[in-house]
Image (cartoon, rainbow, N blue to C red):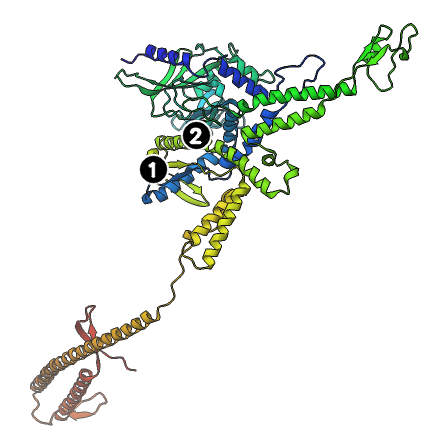
Amino acid sequence: MPDVVKLNAAIDSFEANALGGDKSGDLSSERALSIDAFGGKNIEPAPEGRSQVVDWTVFETIQWILPSLTRIFASGDNVVEFAPVNADDEEAAEQESDYLNYLVTQKNNWFLTCLTWFQDALLTKNAYCMAFMEEKIKTEKKVYREQTDASLAKLLEDGLEVLEANTYPDPSEQPQVMQDPMTGAPVEMPQPNLHDVVVRKNTPTKRLAFKVLPPENVLVGDDTPDFTLANCNYFEYFEDVTISDLRCLGFEIDDDIATDENNNDVIDDARSKYSEDLARGEHPDPSMRVVRARTIFIRHDYDEDGMAELQKVVRVGREILTREEIDRIPVACIVPFINTHRHMGASVADLTFDLQRIKTALLRGGLDSLYLSQNPRHAVSDKVNLDDMLVSRSGGVVRMKDGALPSEGHVMPLTTEFTLPQTLEGLRHMDTVVESRVGVNKLFQGIDASSQNDHNRIGQLSTMAAQRVEQIARVFANGVERLFSVAHEIILKSGHKPEIIKLKGQWVDLDPSTWKTGRDMHVVAPFAAGNKDTLMARLMTIATMQEKALAGGLPIVDAQDAYNTAIEMTKASDFPSPEKFWTNPEMIPPPEPPPDYTMMALEVEQSKADSQAKNVELDAEIDRYKADLDATVAKYRADLDAETKIALAQLKEGQQANIERLKASLKVADNSVGLEMADGKVVPVGNAFNSVVDTVDGQFEQMKEALIEALTAPKEIIRDEQGKVVGTKLKAVQ
């Protein structure tokens, strides 16, 4: 079974021999002296009455180097770039670079992080920065008054926790009396209530964050082979926090938890210029009691499988709050000057502290010489009033005792050699020593007026200074790359959901779950020499060469190459978002090609041929249609003629039968019988019958002619949707 006791014992063993764990040893003393020197503290006070001036060489040197370093790593929005491993990774690498730049520069104060991190390194040797996913619970308390039942219910829908509540009748509402429908008795309805509540909202927050660790709060295993922490077996940083802070981080701890009071008083005193101190120990509010929280990364066989794994442990006192197995220490280390095969390096303060002490001594001696030359000492006898001699003022009087006179030699000035010119020469010499050690010369500072017209010397000295700063920057780049690699890995493992963000002026869909692991990408920190003017001059040279190549038609430069140069020049000018000033040729749609007249002619001829073929096909279709129509009409006419003949025959036969029946019914033998008509006339029956027959015959002939005319009139063929003939209809008369 895993043993927490063994884990604590392993931590204690590493801590006892860790670098930085001496509390008041050599390392802490050196760091404290560097901090004192940087702040201009009078470390070695001169005797009373002597000059107490302090030289600021450490401060000045660091402050002249810092701007160059921050410009290299924190200028613009593009501070990290993932290089693709192969051609398929090009788009993914660009997207990941844009997203991480967004998190670093817009969601964090990257400039301040760099400034603090780099200054720690230049001042106290090794400096440390940690990348982590900051997860906190933001607690807000709010008071809501005069809330109705409905508004209170809506508040509670937002996940608010009610801490206090006071319910009372609404004074603006009068009690209402209703009649009971069953009994008819009056019933007083309850008055609406109002609520005064105190609520608390706990909002979880999550973001990629960076923390610069105070070097004096860091312990590193003494077996660490180099400054990179790549093969470090023990790393610890501690911080003094309140119990409330730990609870906001999700830890469940008691108010009376023990703490480690072993403070690093040496460095604390150096940093606390105005006697700042934390309220450790007892506090009226238990949640605000300050305890020491230790975050420890230790390689330890916790599961006792015979293999030591890297563990992350958070401990307060002897109580382990949390433990988990991790892949690597999420901390990056930088150092200005490395010490090969050792973790601890050297700082700029280490290289200049002795020079500051020497310059302080020279300054004090020169100023003391100046003071004495302006106000020399005197040898006096007991005939002189000493109180008057000690007061040096213009027009002052020195009283003599017992009638003594100045000419009698009772006051004799002592000659002191004036050494200030020699002092200034010595200071100039020490400045050259500073230049040779760290590369910060007057040209680098921009204050050497004597060399403004000597362009060759300016270029030479500027290059020398930039090279020294460039070397420091290249060492720093190793730590910056490691930090971004850690950040990239954290993003992959933190469960980021797909989101839409604006990158380079465009809204982009991002899904970090599809990214490759950090081992598949190489991190490149954008790096340039400290002198941006030199960089701009180099880019201008490249731009000129590209312009000549384009003008000459050489196939070695295209629009994309010119765009890349313009982007880099804009970056060197410290403009954020350089893509705002230039249009990427890849985003421009390609121009339409010129017309191909040969192809157009071929297409016309083909169109003509196709048209002719379609016309031939159409003519054939028309002929087939006409033949079908003629056949259909002929058949229809034949059928119609047959039907007409049959109908006429039937009609005639029917008329004849009617006539015969009429004759039989009338039994007309002759014309002797008369038929009285409507007008009173008497018409012979025979004549009347004959007249009727003639009328019927005439009407029959008319019907026959009308039928023949209708049957022979022009007609229109009726077809269905498939083109099949289904009938006819008379054509409309035009």
Q: Is residue 362 left or right of residue 68?
A: right
The residue closer to the viewer here, 421 or 9, is 421
Q: Position of residue 42 (x, y in %)?
A: 63, 17
Image quadrant holding the N terminus, namely top left
- Between tags 1 and 2, which lies in front? 2
- Few, some or many C-alpha atoms within 10 Å of disc 2 (few <14, some 14-19, many ≥20)? many
The residue closer to the viewer here, 660 or 338, is 338
Q: Position of residue 548 (x, y in %)?
A: 48, 56
Q: Which type of secondary structure does the marked residue at label 2 adopt?
A: helix
- Few, some or many C-alpha atoms within 10 Å of disc 1 (few <14, some 14-19, many ≥20)? some
Question: According to the image, label 2 marks what residue?
Answer: 479
Question: From where the camera sits, is residue 584 visible?
Answer: no
- Image point (64%, 35%), residue name: 447
Upstream in sequence: badge 1 or badge 2: 2
The residue closer to the viewer here, 568 or 107, is 568
Q: CA distance from mark 1 to mark 2?
A: 23 Å
- Image point (59%, 40%), residue name: 458
Kindly indicate the quadrant of the structure image that contains residue 709.
bottom left
Question: From where the camera sits, is residue 734 visible?
Answer: yes
State the residue lying farthest toward the right. Answer: 403
Image quadrant holding the C terminus, namely bottom left
Q: Position of residue 143 (x, y in %)?
A: 51, 24
Question: According to the image, label 1 marks what residue?
Answer: 515
The residue closer to the viewer here, 545 or 59, is 545
Eyeballing the image, is 159 above or below 262?
below
Q: Which type of secondary structure does the marked residue at label 1 adopt?
A: loop
Amino acid type, residue under disc 1 in the picture: Trp
Residue 75 is labelled as none
